[in-house]
Amino acid sequence: MTNSNQSNAPSDESKTGFWQKNWVKNSLTVAVFIVLYLAMRPFMQGDVIEGKAPIMQLTSINGEPIDLQQLSMQGQPVLVHFWATWCPICSVAHDDIESIAEDYAVINIASQSADDEQLMAYAAENNMNPALIVNDLDGQWMSTFGAKAVPADFIIDGQGNIRFVEVGFTTEIGLRLRLWLAGF
């Protein structure tokens, strides 16, 4: 015989949330990930260059000339974004970079990825502007900047100085904030 006072409602124990049930363990897990990230950051940054940005006279994959020195000397910050077609994290950032390019100068450098024709197809598949994409097939420009991983973002101020470097995924808001700060 069943007790009519028993219900199928979850017990108070199963109602507790993720953080309430194991808050110490979960807090320690988050702290470990933060410490690991901070410990890896110097390796990810590698030997990135500082100071004046290198003089770059490039050609986009659709034949448009791109001159970093000319762009940065216009008084507005420039985002130099290194990425690769084989990088899954990079593909997450494509829309963010295209959005930023509506408001700021962006040089989108595909490093060690594919030939120009393949990059044009990749750009079309991913709604990317080929006029912003430079092919760095041999990784020369990535090496010049000292980046050892992709994605890597270099924010150049209006005087041609590297103001911020971020290696690894960075949110659109984070990049926009750095670009805004580089404008002062």
Image (cartoon, grey):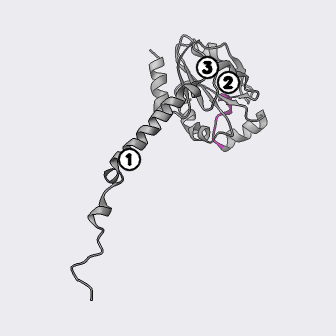
Q: In the image shown, does 168 or 117 lie closer to the viewer?
A: 168
Q: Is residue 181 magenta?
A: no
x, y percentage for residue 104? Answer: 54, 25
Quadrant holding the N terminus: bottom left
Q: Mark 1 and mark 2: span between their CA atoms?
A: 40 Å
Q: Mark 2: few, some, or many residues within 10 Å (few <14, many ≥20)?
A: many
On screen, residue 122 above or below 47: below
For the point 58% across and 27% down, the residue is 43
Residue beneath disc 3: 47
x, y percentage for residue 180? Answer: 45, 22
x, y percentage for residue 12? Answer: 26, 63
Classify mark 1: helix, strand or loop: helix
x, y percentage for residue 151? Answer: 60, 32
Choose mark 1 or mark 3, whichever is in front. 1
Residue beneath disc 1: 25
Viewed as shown, does residue 151 lie left or right of 139?
A: left
Q: Please state the extent of the stretch shown in magenta in the rendering.
A: 126-134
Q: In the image shown, does 82 or 56 lie closer to the viewer?
A: 82
For the point 68% across and 41% down, the residue is 124
